[in-house]
Image (tube, grey):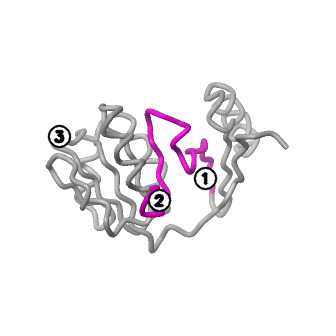
């Protein structure tokens, strides 16, 4: 068995609290991927991407404009470390591992408990595609081919 393969797990996130530390372009993409599936997302960052701020006007997403503090993840079920500071992301990931909170560190895949798949969502069908963090272009290409096949 190859090391580094990730099991595709489909999980109900509707009652889970997701905490995203950081609010830039990567955070925006990940929030968009999660948005239809989650109950609550809290975004902590001193500056919030305008597209994320637009979503903050809903019950699903709230923003907290401040620098990250360790207490921000205390009640989280899942954490995304998506700041533009690799050291801060590493600190967040290490704390999450101590607290047994699944974490995705956008700047260091070896610290990730899970990866973000390319998601295809049509009606009642949800398909996730990943290359186990190795080849994002290949995963994106396969995702597009599946999407095209479903659209026929």
Residue 39 found in image quarter = bottom left
Furthest-front residue in this view: 98
**Residue at the (34%, 44%) spot, across then down:** 91
Badge 3 is on which residue?
47
Badge 2 is on which residue?
36
Q: Secondary structure at mark 1?
A: strand
Furthest-bottom residue in this view: 15
Using residue 21 as the reference point, say whether residue 39 is left or right of it: right
- How far apart marks 3 and 1 lie (CA) works out to 30 Å
Q: Is residue 100 above or below residue 80?
A: below
**Residue at the (48%, 48%) spot, across then down:** 33
**Residue at the (24%, 51%) spot, across then down:** 44
Badge 2: how crowded within 10 Å, few (<14), some, or many (20+)?
Answer: few
Furthest-right residue in this view: 1
| Part of the protein shown in magenta | 97-122
The residue nearer to you, when weighing 75 against 98, is 98
> Which quarter of the image is occupied by the C terminus?
top right
Badge 1 is on which residue?
121
Q: Secondary structure at mark 2?
A: loop
Contact? badges 3 and 1 (CB < 8 Å)? no
Contact? badges 1 and 2 (CB < 8 Å)? yes
Q: Is residue 66 magenta?
A: no
Q: Is residue 133 above or below residue 18?
A: above
Residue 132 percent coordinates (x, y): 67, 39
Q: Secondary structure at mark 3?
A: loop
């Amino acid at each position: 068995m190859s090391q580094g393969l990730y099991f595709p797990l489909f999980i109900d996130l509707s009652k889970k609290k997701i905490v995203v530390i950081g609010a830039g372009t990567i955070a925006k993409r990940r929030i968009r991927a999660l948005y239809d599936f989650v109950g609550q997302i809290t975004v902590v960052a001193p500056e919030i991407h305008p597209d994320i701020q637009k979503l903050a006007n809903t019950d699903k997403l709230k923003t907290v404009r401040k620098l990250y503090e360790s207490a921000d993840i205390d009640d989280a079920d899942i954490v995304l470390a998506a700041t533009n500071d690799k050291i801060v992301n590493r600190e967040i990931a290490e704390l999450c591992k101590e607290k047994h909170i699944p974490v995705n560190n956008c700047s260091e895949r070896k610290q990730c408990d899970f990866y973000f798949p390319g998601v295809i969502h049509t009606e009642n069908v949800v398909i996730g595609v990943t290359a186990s963090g190795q080849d994002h272009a290949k995963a994106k290409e396969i995702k597009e081919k599946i999407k095209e096949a479903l659209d026929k």
